[in-house]
Image: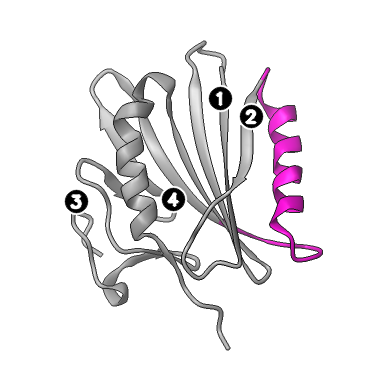
Amino acid sequence: MSTSPGQSAAHASAARIGRWIIPGIPYGWTWVPEFGIQKRSEGVVPSNVYLREDQLLAGDRLELYIRAQITIMKRTFMEPMIAGPVPAEFPEAAEAAMLMLKHRPMHQVTVFQVQHYVRSGKWIGIVTLTTLESELLQVRPDFDQFMKALRIEPEPA
């Protein structure tokens, strides 16, 4: 994959994190190996998109996994505001959902997270945009573009 901002690559040369296939990154964002992408703006905490994976331990429902994640969020963040989850679409996924989280860490700035959960078999892919609330309107179009290009590698036969 080209790590030049705004460029895309064929699937064969695309970057990968686990089963995630990252064909390109939005202009102005930087590739961070084994993490995802990051956008730096002067005088502002960087926005980032973190890609990770997990496995369903029991059952085959994404909803139960997300409920467990919400429980963790409520224990981790002080007074979190959580919206969702709501159903979402993702190519070749059995299920997908999105939720949003808003919280204030110790520095008293409002942090906003948009989390997409994707299930394929027992595999769960999680994509998390983390940004300051004040930056959300500026970075959300780039995040949406990134999500449209993102793919998952099919399960091995």
Percent across and percent down for residue 6 are 19, 51
Instruction: Name the disc covering residue 82, or none.
Output: 2
Q: Is residue 94 above or below residue 71?
A: below
Do the residues under discs 2 and 1 have CB atoms within 8 angstroms? yes
User: Total number of numbered labels?
Assistant: 4
Residue hosting label 3: 6
Amino acid type assigned to the residue bearing label 1 in the image: Lys
Q: Secondary structure at mark 3?
A: loop
Is residue 37 one of those drawn in magenta? no
| Quarter of the C terminus within the rendering | bottom right
Q: Which residue is mark 1?
A: 102
Mark found first going from the N terminus, 4 or 2: 4
Please report the residue visible at 55 percent of the width from the left and 84 percent of the height from the top. 156
Element marked by disc 1: strand
Q: Which residue is mark 4?
A: 35
Question: Disc 4 and disc 2: Cα gap in Å?
Answer: 24 Å
Tell me how far mark 4 sits from mark 3, CA to CA: 18 Å
Give residue 7's position: percent from left, percent from top: 18, 57
Q: Is there CB contact under 8 Å for labels 3 and 1?
A: no
Instruction: Indicate which disc, 4 or 3, sits on the residue closer to the N terminus.
Output: 3
Q: Residue at x 27, y 45 (%)?
A: 30
Give the residue at x 42% y 43%: 49
Q: Which residues are magenta?
A: 53-79
Which amino acid, mark 2?
Answer: Ile
**In this orientation, does residue 32 appear?**
no
